[in-house]
Image (cartoon, rainbow, N blue to C red):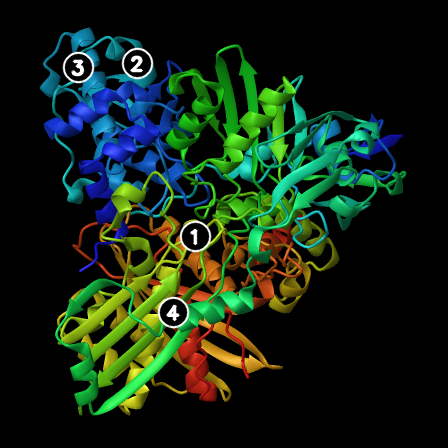
Amino acid sequence: MKLDINGSVHEVEASPDMPLLWVLRDVLGFTGTKFGCGMAQCGACTVHLDGQPVRSCVTPVSSVGARKVRTIEGLSADGSHPVQRAWAQADVVQCGYCQSGQIMTTVALLEQKAEPSDADIDAALSGNICRCGTYVRIREAVHLAAKLQRGAAK
Amino acid sequence: MTMNRRELLRNAVASTAGLVVAFQVPRALRVAEAAGAPPPPPATAFLRIGTDDSVTVLLAHSEMGQGIWTGLAMLIAEELECDWSKVRSEHAPAAPVYAHPAFGIQMTGGSSTTWSEFDRYRTVGATARDMLVRAAAARWKVPVASCRAANGHVIHGKQQLSFGQLAEAAMALTPPKTVQLKDAKEWKLIGTPVRRLDTPEKINGTAIFGIDVQFPGLRVATVARPPAFGAKLGKYDASEALKVPGVEKVVPTANGVAVVAKHFWAAKVGRDALKIEWLAPEGGGIDTAKQMADFRATAKQPGTTVAERGKVADALAGAKLKLTSEYEVPYLAHASMEPLNCTVKIDGDKCEIWTGTQFQTGDQGAAAAILGIKPEQVTIHTTFLGGGFGRRANPAADFVGEAVIVAKAAGVPVKVVWTREDDMHGGYYRPAYVHRIQTGLDDKGHPVAWDHVVVGQSIVAGTPFEPMLVKHGIDGTSVEGLADSPYLEATGALRVSLHSPRTPITVLWWRSVGNTHTAFAMESMIDEAAHAAGQDPLAYRMMLLKEKPRHATALALAADKAGWNTPLPAGHARGLAVHESFGSIVAQVAEVSVEHGNIRVHQVTCAVDCGQVVNPLGLEAQIQGSIAFGLSAALHGKLTFAGGRVQESNFHDYPVVRMYEMPRVSVHVVHSKAKMGGIGEPATAPIAPAVANAVFALTKQRLRTLPLRLA
């Protein structure tokens, strides 16, 4: 089957029920997307399908079809995406393991809502667990990213 | 009086027979210890300066989120006078030179990295600077004293050479025997907020954690492990597993069965297809309800004496007011976001290991023992850790040793990956504890009698640390913060005793270790005493802390910043706690409400005295994170056993704090001349009692069991 990942088409051989997460990680080597729970509880595996955030650990690869997959590697390698810039400026990361998922969820949130409220952030990001407890700075970075994105749009 | 863990470990290193045998601490180190004077650190082991001006700091400790990637680099850079934008960090290999300066083995834990490396890493920076300056002076043929280093260059008048231009010549020089470290008032980096050096790779997906290790020929394995503590492997049938496309081999481990496949998914599907007969635990296995009932019954009798003064029974009998309370905490999983994993490649008499570990020396020794080779034949590549919290510092080397066994049996390089369920069922938990406290107060409310019994498994019993850390039958980590409580120094009659029952459940340190339960018991009981004496909880504590200025200052600062005794919205209340651990003192005020029957924490105001702060931005992050970690235990964390099986399995039934539950956190640092303490753990323990005390203020319900549940 063919997968469109970050703008490139990849020919993949995998059993149809294999979750997209493991195709990305173990077959194609996109290891930026993380395994945390395997049951859509923690958000570490969040990627976008046609711009919508999904849990790749419970998404059978056969269900992806022609939809465009976007992973953390597809944001920007140099950290120039506004959400990445906000993450750096707010000094969010600790161990860093959950942050790909946190960032991908935030990118999708900001595409829906350019100026999310704290309640919007709670609703969008409560599916992403961080055991280091970076939540305070994630919240700060989401607001900052919204500001940076608005600045870039002007 | 008990010693804290740091003191215990220091003593352990000083009289270190067990540690040396267990971990084969090399002879040179032992000789140095015996002589009492550590040799100067070889700068080249800790620092590389490239001809391209790059400055690479080698970390003797593991980055697991706590920020040493940045903090240790700051220590070197402060003395080196390099260009901070050229500084990079990487993990050092496992080698004797990287042994913990205080603990004698290469490891990360006990909130000890920064204070233990404060001198060594600065000395490395100063040593390299001295060599660079001398190299420049020689090239220019001018006196050394006329040259100085600044911003990555050595300067003499209008001449300058970059560190990169001088690196090779400097390397050829003899290192100085001693160096003069800067005075604190000359510091330019230490004490200033510095953003993390590991951010770029952690926000673009390129940071490599253990689970991300890949190379040609590497296979992935999952392991079926005993489903209950005390269960054993019986017969197994691998025929269906071997039919799964991608599965290549099925091999036995010490206590289970490994499925080796082309990738994780095949290994997991293959494991699901195994038919295994497990032999049930003898006696049926642990049941939580019965175990806790046993612990409560045990707590009614004194255990092994930890500390005793005066006649506690007489003092209790003579007290004006008597209180008896029992506090309970359950077993807890660390539940790091990155499930455990380890990659092993065996090549003849050499072994390479890639893993996120906090315990290089122990893991290296364990792998060597399994393979019948020498520790130095085992190379450990420490990756980033997707959270550690103590789980990746296991004296039993469980996840490393098992992977070595699988790779050896499979005859190919293997990455063993644990599922979340494996990780949660895999043991090495924070042990459950029961505290039973009887206290007697005089007419002013002072505790004049304190009888405290602790029941719970020892973390270090059965490990190579036991000979040093268990003294006179007391595991110091079970009782830290009790006998040496700042509240009880004036208490004339005191008895603290400990029961350490052994069970088949494996246990381990969990962020802030014994303080997770001792602070909950102490700070709750003191709060009960304040209320029983009819006194304000803050005023009562300040009265007892009159002779403890660091505690009193931190508590007063937190209370002041929180607006203690100022009005709150209807339905809100505040509670407080202060606790010393890992050489630091942390006071917290929690503001709570109850919403739909659930405890909601809105704001935590935190004051900390940890002595000199290296990176205030990192400190703030550690306080926020510790509060989240402790709050997960206060509100949610609980493992339940039935027939020796853990009933919880993943984040749906072992919830942790999520974004919507995270309080606002304000952090206030006491400007302190005190000896430097740790900061990775000390803010974890006070949050549970601060919240419980706030819930009491709000509801008059005294919640004595974690996780907190309203009636």
Sequence-wise first label, 4 or 1? 4
Location of mark 1 (residue): B510
B592 and B452: which is toward the camera: B452
- Looking at the rendered structure, whether the residues under marks 4 and 3 are on a common chain is answered as yes
Q: Is residue B336 above or below residue B211?
A: below
Evaluate whether residue B42 shows in this view: no
Crowd tier of the residue under label 3, counting other residues whose Cα lies within 10 Å: few below 14, some 14–19, many 20 or above? many
Q: Amino acid at mark 4?
A: Thr
Q: Is residue B3 above or below residue A81?
A: below
Q: Mark 3 is on which residue type?
A: Arg
Residue B167: mark in rendering: 2
Q: Amino acid at mark 2?
A: Ala
Q: Specify whether disc 1 shares its chain with disc 3.
A: yes
- Residue at image point 40% right, 24% down: B93
Chain of the residue that carries numbered disc 2 in the rendered image = B
In the image: residue B270, left or right of residue B59 = right
Q: CA distance from mark 2 to mark 4?
A: 65 Å
First along the sequence among labels 2 and 4: 2
B324, B377: nearer the viewer:
B324
Residue at the outermost front position: B283
The residue indicated by pointer 3 is B134
Residue bearing mark 4: B298
Alpha carbons under labels 2 and 1: distance apart: 43 Å
Q: Disc 2 on helix, strand or loop?
A: helix
Of callouts 2 and 1, the N-terminal one? 2
Q: Quadrant of the C terminus of chain B?
A: bottom right
Query: Quarter of the image holding residue B235?
Result: top right
Q: What chain letter is assigned to the residue under label 3?
A: B
- Whole-number angstrom distance, CA of label 4 to CA of label 1: 24 Å
